[in-house]
Amino acid sequence: MWSKIKYWIALLFLLFSIGQGVGQCWLSHLTDIYKNTDNTTFRNFIDDVDTDGFGKFRNLYAVVGSNRIDKLLDPDVLRLFDRLDEGTKTRLSNNLNNEDLLRFSKDFVGASDDALRTLNNRSDLIDYWRVNRNAIRNRSYPDNAGHVSWETTSQNIELRGTLSQNKILVAVDEADSPTNSQVVVAGAYADELGGDVVIRYNNNNFDIDLLEPELKQYLDYLQMIKSDFDAGGNLYQRLYSNVTPEKIRNAGLVGKHAEVLATNEVIKQLKQAGRFNGIQDLNKIEVLTKSRRFGNMHRCPHCFQILNGVRMIGNQ
């Protein structure tokens, strides 16, 4: 009851202010927008006293000002700005145009408090979102992504695989089986280098700062998505494509899976040989994974992004 009374007092005060000739002060300007807009979604949000819509509207206006407010009449913008600290709101207003600000609000309005705290402390993630958001979303996770039995994988490679793929298969088969904590073994190889197949295992203690820059470029952004899911948010639905709750739940620690670590070592070898000139050369590397339980495992959503360009054998 008290919330309704406060709402009507505020609205009457605004209308009275207009009647008294306050003119285009910010209070009357916001009320004029509310009265004149044909955006029914926005009007309904303001009319819902339980949302304190007008308070959120006033909060947004204080950041973006009169020149932009008419273009940002969206409940998701109002809800998001109500949850951010002043510095982050100012950075969003300064760094994003109206179209991007609307899109950002749609993406992050359902984010957890944990993710928003990360944004408050890491303004570079806003810039990363602006530059890379579409590229990552457009790499849609494969439909019905699942594991392939090791027997099937081995037979397919032996019958139809290249010499290098058979070499990787032999190396993975001869490697020690992963322990319960390691879960997966991966073999990586670049045919133009020759030499031995690189074998690596999942390693939760690996320092991701040791990854080559080509594999580190997404890590903080992907970690934000994973941490947000663990905290109850839905960023994975907005920033990834076609990823199920089960896949993001089981994805594990970002950047510490066997296929990433094996690829990282081959990148270093290619660089030492003067044969790696940028991310486009990831396609020189082939990788095969084998799980303790699931055979040829499909990559998790994070590895799917990190290893974009690497040629995965038998399963994407």
Image: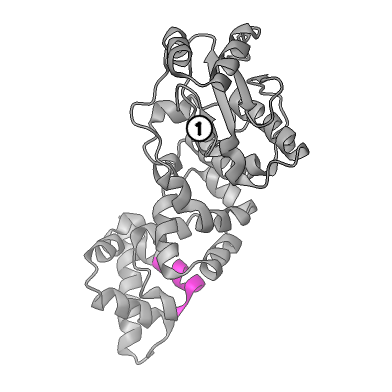
Residue 254 in the image, given as x and y percentages of width and height: 59, 33
Q: Which residue is mark 1?
A: 230
User: What crowding class fits label 1: few (fewer than 14 Cα within 10 Å), some (14-19), or many (20 or more)?
Assistant: some
Relative side of 214 to 66, left or right: right
Question: Is-magenta flag for residue 61?
Answer: yes
What are the residue bounds of the magenta stretch? 57-66
Q: Is residue 275 visible?
A: yes
Residue 162 in the image, given as x and y percentages of width and height: 51, 21
The foreground one among 154 and 228 is 154
The foreground one among 237 and 116 is 237
Residue 127 in the image, given as x and y percentages of width and height: 57, 58
Q: Is residue 256 visible?
A: no
Relative side of 1 to 152, left or right: left
Question: Is-magenta flag for residue 239?
Answer: no
Q: Amino acid at mark 1?
A: Asp
Mark 1, secondary structure of its residue = helix
Magenta-colored segment: predominant secondary structure: helix
Q: Is residue 235 above or below residue 192?
A: below
Q: Residue at x 55, y 67 (%)?
A: 95
Q: Is residue 33 above or below residue 130?
A: below
